[in-house]
Image (tube, helix red, strand yellow):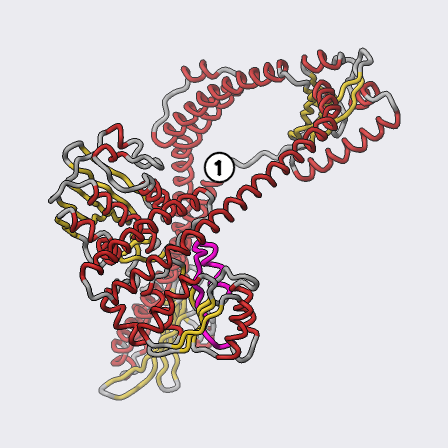
Amino acid sequence: MSVTKKQSVSTQVIILLVSVVTLAFGLIGAVGYHFYHRELWQELQNELSVNADQASTSIGLAVWNLDHEQIRKIMESTMRNQVIYGVVVQYGNISIALARDSAWGIRKARSNEFAAGDLLVTKHEINFSGESIGNLTLYATPQFLNQKLKRSLQLLMGSIFFLDLLLVVSLYLLIWKQMLRPLKLIGAYAAAVSAGQHGKQEKSAPALAGEFGELSDSIQKMVVLLESQLGELKESNERFWNMVRRFPLPLVIYAPTSGQIVFLNQKFSEVFGYILSDIPHANDWFNLAYPDENYRQQVIDVWTRELETALLTNDLVRALSYKITCKNRETKVVDVGGVPSGEYMLVVFNDITERMQAEDEVRRYQDHLEDLVQQRTTELEAARDLAEAASRAKSVFLANMSHELRTPMNAILGFSQILMMTLENQAHKGYVQEIHTAGDHLLELINELLDMASIEAGKLAVSIEPVDVCAVLDASIHMVNSLILVNEIQLINQCEAGMYVQADNNRLRQVLVNLLSNAAKYNRIGGSISIETQLVEEGRIRILVKDTGLGIAPDDVQRLFNPFERVGAQFGAIEGTGIGLALSKKLMTLMHGAIGVESQPGQGSTFSIELSLAGNGNKTYEVTAEEIGNKFEEIGKLKILYVEDNPANLRLMEAIFKDQIGSTLVSATTGEQGLELAKKTLPDLILLDIQLPGMDGYAVLAALRAASETHDIPVIALSADAMPNHVERGRKAGFFAYLTKPLDITALQQSIKAALG
């Protein structure tokens, strides 16, 4: 194979620069020569015209006198100029002509021999005394002009050649010194490095200046860096091969295209017993490792397919399990996978024989474990059924307790409200007020017990909505106002208006009432209660209730929120069940809030609750007793059907509607009877109990809605079933309102007014 020698870069640079300079000089010379040629021709023409003008003036007298001798002398005198080739004078019929001979002398000539095309001709009239007497014609030769131009052209070409030669020599010397010599030195340095003589060459190499010096330094630094990296690469390569040789799993390196096995590590020989001389080729491995011909072919097909997939996707060869026969004829189960790398493949073997044996052992116990699991599952299902039954029984018990306790309380609180509105004797009205207060307290205790049980059973739900903090505080203060007045306590309410929190309005009021009543009960006579609201970080508000009571000991603070812990009982006979604070803590948790306390013995206590801030919601307002009476009068006389099996509750409704309003009240004690009366009397409003003998309230409501004559009559539920799920069910069933017992007369009045529009 022939190798074409590459042209030197210096030659290419010199040829390029000389060509460019020669072309530039040639163009400049051509332009200059053109202007020089035109200038010389113009000078020759001007000179010829001047000579002709002088000669025609000089010869005029001689021609006028017909002095031929004088005419000839003047003509010869004119031809002293070497440029003049011939002169012709014509006057009358006479023509005199002189021309150059071969020796460039003067001879007579004929006027017709000057027809040569390369002569310059100038013709002037001969005048004498203002009269034209003949013609003078001069002929000039461009011979001398062409010779001069030729010498100028030769001088120009010689100058260009000399400049080119000077440029070639200068460029070669410059390039040799500034480029070729440094490049040859750098090339010699590179050759020395390639030959392993880096250190020697570095000492003998002369210093270079400029960019080549920087290039030489950079190359030397690069060589040093490459040598360092080469050393590191050698060390890394040695570490790699040491790691491969000592790798804890069997490894094999082979070429997939040729099947040649080039390496196997020590672990491979330890596990399978084969060495490289036993299996120099992949076919040798397949024959020894898989002696069964059919199984061997299956392994080869699977391995080939996985290998082709890995090479196409540039991915790993998927590890699959194979049964390999060792050199000692022992059979092992091995996971085999590979890593392609260029022309070679690294094959990794993982002996899983012991693991497979363990899995077989596990499988032997699996059936037995499944039986045990099935048995345990059956037992757990039975236990779950018992737990669910217990939960249902607890829910039924809570519902029944709520119903049975609220039913008599409805009569107590209802009639006490009626008596307070009708009695004029202040002493008797005070007695009834005490009954009503005791009933409220009893209802509060019942509610706390039932709420605590509902929370423990996971049955109590809250309705989170924006709540006006100051409004709910005012309502809470109103509910404990009698207790505050009895103990002569000064109340300082510093609530900032316009603050709303995310909470359940009723449950928040329940918590605040509990805190305020405790602050009043455990306070000194004539003490004070201070209420403050504070904004805290992360969009939350803190409500503080401070009292000037006896305080709480540090040990008692730890158990303050435990159920049935009456920490302040040692201060005297104070009413309470000991679950108020425990219930308040659980309610605050349901409302995503928190409750806390700080106290020092003898200095009072500060209870605080925290809730998330909310946007301004709808404010709630408390209705006074006077407003209740007035609003009942606004309802007017009605025809009302009341379905209730409890006589006390029936008498309460009669006292309200018959005695106070003068309405017509029709009553029934069973659902069937109530349905019949509704169709017969078509009342303005139906008040319906839920727990009825025979048809319950839900069945009566469905029948009323199904009948066309009673479909549009509003129905309000009055029930002692006050659990949250009961209230929710009543609302979904279609009651206009679901009111719980003990009955809140204000709520009843508002519901009736809304139902009747």
Residue 552 found in image quarter:
top left
Give the extent of the magenta segment. Answer: 711-733
On the rendered image, what quadrant is the C terminus found in?
Answer: bottom left
Residue at left offset 78%, top offset 33%: 302
Instruction: Tell me if residue 215 can be seen.
Output: yes
At label 1, the amino acid type is: Val
Q: Nearer the viewer, residue 66 or 298?
A: 298
The reply, left or right, for residue 360 in relation to residue 447 is right
Residue 337 found in image quarter:
top right
Instruction: Tell me if residue 98 can be seen.
Output: no
Residue beneath disc 1: 9
Residue at left offset 47%, top offset 17%: 198
Q: Nearer the viewer, residue 80 or 210?
A: 210
Across and down, in percent, residue 686 comes to 45, 72
The reply, left or right, for residue 236 in relation to residue 745 is right
The number of numbered discs placed on residues in the rendered structure image is 1
Across and down, in percent, residue 178 comes to 39, 32
Across and down, in percent, residue 186 comes to 45, 26
